[in-house]
Image (cartoon, grey):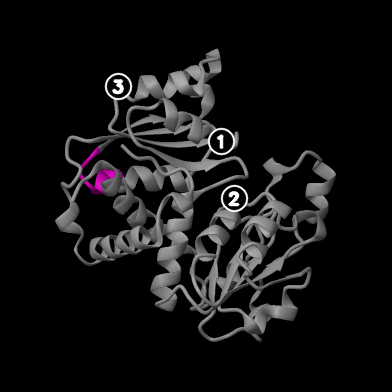
Amino acid sequence: MRSVIDILDLSTEEIDDLIKTACDIIDDPDKYAEKCKRKKLATLFFEPSTRTRLSFEAAMYELGGNVIGFSAANNSSASKGESVSDTVKTVSCYADIIAMRHPKEGAPLVASMAASVPIINAGDGGHNHPTQTLADLLTIYREKGRFDNLTIGLCGDLKFGRTVHSLINAMSRYNGIEFVLISPEELKLPDYVTNNVLKKKNIPYTETTDLLSCMSELDILYMTRVQRERFFNEQDYIRLKDSYILTPDKLETAKDDLAVMHPLPRVNEISVAVDNDKRACYFKQVLNGKYMRMALIMKLLGVE
């Protein structure tokens, strides 16, 4: 039995295999319609989510399986004080695989030690979000056809953005990657990511507060929202939330084949006027996430 808590739990070869499976699902969905028949996925979401939870549910249904679970901690026995370990031990009796989101960093890892079925981390605090990264990787692959020799701009909340941390970890394993880190001083990439990943692996990166100054060199622009729920101080949130808003005029100097990505939900950091630009890939990302979750569920359940 195997769980996926961090994107680094998967080797680059395994990611290649998942992408290959996802592309095959896209080409021939009927072939996969009963791959998980009589299997059950439990979605344990201790923190609100729209996309991730529905994506997991859609993935399991499209594989012919069933879904049980809850969408908020107050809908579960956690509201009575039950531990995460006891919750997953109980749910392991009902389900074949568990997708879990939790506001506390490390909770899915603790869960994986107690569960008797595979656990997929569907986001833990500001820490990891491996299946969003799988969605990102399939999007990059389908838009660019490669994972090497890319300049990736990461913009917005780089401090608390778990999708950013996971993507840096994933892309740091490929050759010729360069990162441009675009954020206010208060939301810079944490030192542990800078030191343990970028500096340790000698990956070139630049830090800037100015999105326009680097737009022309980017192959990928990964926008993020400034997240109210990660702030201790409402005034800090209000002051920083509109720091970076992508509009069509800001894309005038960008490459024709730039891929604009966003893990969603967006608030106002990408103008809706950008949605019609052929470089906008964020809704493709949503769909790609479903296909990669289908591939991952099959892998962890040992379904060929």
N-terminal of the pair, mark 3 or mark 2, is 3
Between marks 3 and 2, how big is the CA–CA gap? Answer: 30 Å
Indicate the secondary structure of the residue bearing disc 2: helix
What is the x, y in percent for residue 41? Answer: 31, 36
Instruction: Identify the residue at image location x=30%, y=51%.
Output: 294
Say if 239 sits above or below 273 in the image.
Answer: above
Instruction: Identify the residue at image location x=34%, y=42%.
Output: 57
Mark 1 Cα shell of 10 Å, populated few (<14), some (14-19), many (≥20): some
Instruction: Identify the residue at image location x=64%, y=80%.
Output: 251
Give left or right: position of 12 versus 278: left
Question: Tag 3: residue type?
Answer: Cys
Instruction: Identify the residue at image location x=60%, y=40%.
Output: 125
Between marks 3 and 1, how big is the CA–CA gap? Answer: 22 Å
Question: Tag 1: residue type?
Answer: Gly
What is the x, y in percent for residue 292? Answer: 35, 56
> Dots 1 and 2: beta carbons under 8 Å?
no
Range of residues picked out in magenta: 60-65
Seen as rendered, the residue at the extreme top is: 80
Identify residue for label 3. Answer: 93
> Dots 3 and 2: beta carbons under 8 Å?
no
Mark 3 Cα shell of 10 Å, populated few (<14), some (14-19), many (≥20): few
Between marks 1 and 2, how big is the CA–CA gap? Answer: 12 Å
Q: Nearer the viewer, residue 281 or 121?
A: 121
What is the x, y in percent for residue 285? Answer: 45, 62
Say if 44 sits above or below 16 in the image.
Answer: above
Identify residue for label 2. Answer: 162
Question: Tag 2: residue type?
Answer: Arg
Indicate the secondary structure of the residue bearing disc 1: loop
Checking the image for residue 106, the label placed there is 1
Q: Nearer the viewer, mark 1 or mark 2?
A: 1
